[in-house]
Image (cartoon, rainbow, N blue to C red):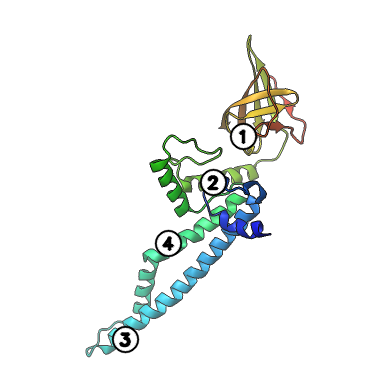
Amino acid sequence: MWIFLLGPFLSLFPRRWRKALPFYDAVDWRSAAILSGLAESALAIAGLMYWYSYSMTAWVSSALDNVLNKSSATGITDHEIGFAALVVWATHPLTWCIAFFCVEGAWRLCASFTDTVLGIFPLYLLEKTYSRIFRRGAPEPAGAVKFSQGHVSSYVSTVAEKVLTARLSQGPDELLVTKNSAEEFLEIRASCVKPDWTPPRVVRYEDRYYRLEECSRESGARPFVYKLRRLAAGVPGRRVITYSPDEAPILANR
């Protein structure tokens, strides 16, 4: 029960920090990220509304007091004062900061529906800065977003990928087997992305083992392309991906 309650808070952490938790596998990270993103966006919207109410009331009241205390007429109306206060509020750094968390919460919520758990941006920057300074040369965890890509770019890529998948009609994968004198290659074309299929993962299909060499995205009804090289032998394990499609794949010929 306590893991379920802590899950939404722990999903705020970067991937490396979450992977270091001893109970990482016991947490339903997808549900935790959905609750966390929804809560972040809702709290930020509430904060933005409170900040608007407080600032507009305080600034307009202060401006009216200054105008009324002057002995000579200034010609400034209460509507002009209200508009000026609105402009100041819209350009205030705190307004932009709260609005950022509104948008980030929505992005994290959308990304969670694709089984992608994204931590909040400030902790992401802290983790990356620490890693760049104290962990140079340490390998990145599988599936981690590269620093050069940017955290915001990963949001955009995730949502764009989700939109692309939603527009495509779901259908069976297309398989193409090619051989030369020494090696055998398997190319899989899918209409939706395959989670965790990142090179150089080992994939087991039927009784054969392949090493995932390349992932790419092209045009067409099956834009997600995975190219694999057959291995002479393989050993079952936790890191091996078992490829067993729900629908019988289409065998392509070239």
On the image, the x and y values in percent for residue 210 come to: 65, 24
Asked if marks 1 and 3 touch (Cβ < 8 Å), the reply is no
Reading the image, the residue beneath label 1 is 197
Mark number, residue 65:
3
**Distance (Cα) linking label 1 and label 4:** 36 Å
Circle 1 sits in a helix, a strand or a loop, which is it? Answer: loop
- Check the image and name the residue furthest to the bottom: 71
Q: Which kind of residue does numbered mark 3 sit on? A: Asp
Crowding at mark 3 (Cα within 10 Å: few <14, some 14-19, many 20+):
few
Asked if marks 3 and 2 touch (Cβ < 8 Å), the reply is no
On the image, the x and y values in percent for residue 6 come to: 61, 58
Is residue 120 in view from this perspective? yes
- Of circles 1 and 3, the one toward us is 1
Reading the image, the residue beneath label 4 is 97
Q: Which kind of residue does numbered mark 4 sit on? A: Cys
- The picture quadrant where one finds residue 196 is top right
Residue at the location (65% across, 56% down)?
3
Residue 182 horizontal side relative to residue 154, left or right: right
Mark number, residue 69:
none
Circle 4 sits in a helix, a strand or a loop, which is it? Answer: helix
Q: Which kind of residue does numbered mark 2 sit on? A: Arg
**Distance (Cα) linking label 1 and label 3:** 64 Å
Reading the image, the residue beneath label 2 is 15
**Distance (Cα) linking label 1 and label 2:** 17 Å
Circle 3 sits in a helix, a strand or a loop, which is it? Answer: helix
**Distance (Cα) linking label 3 and label 2:** 52 Å
Asked if marks 1 and 4 touch (Cβ < 8 Å), the reply is no
Residue 249 horizontal side relative to residue 130, left or right: right
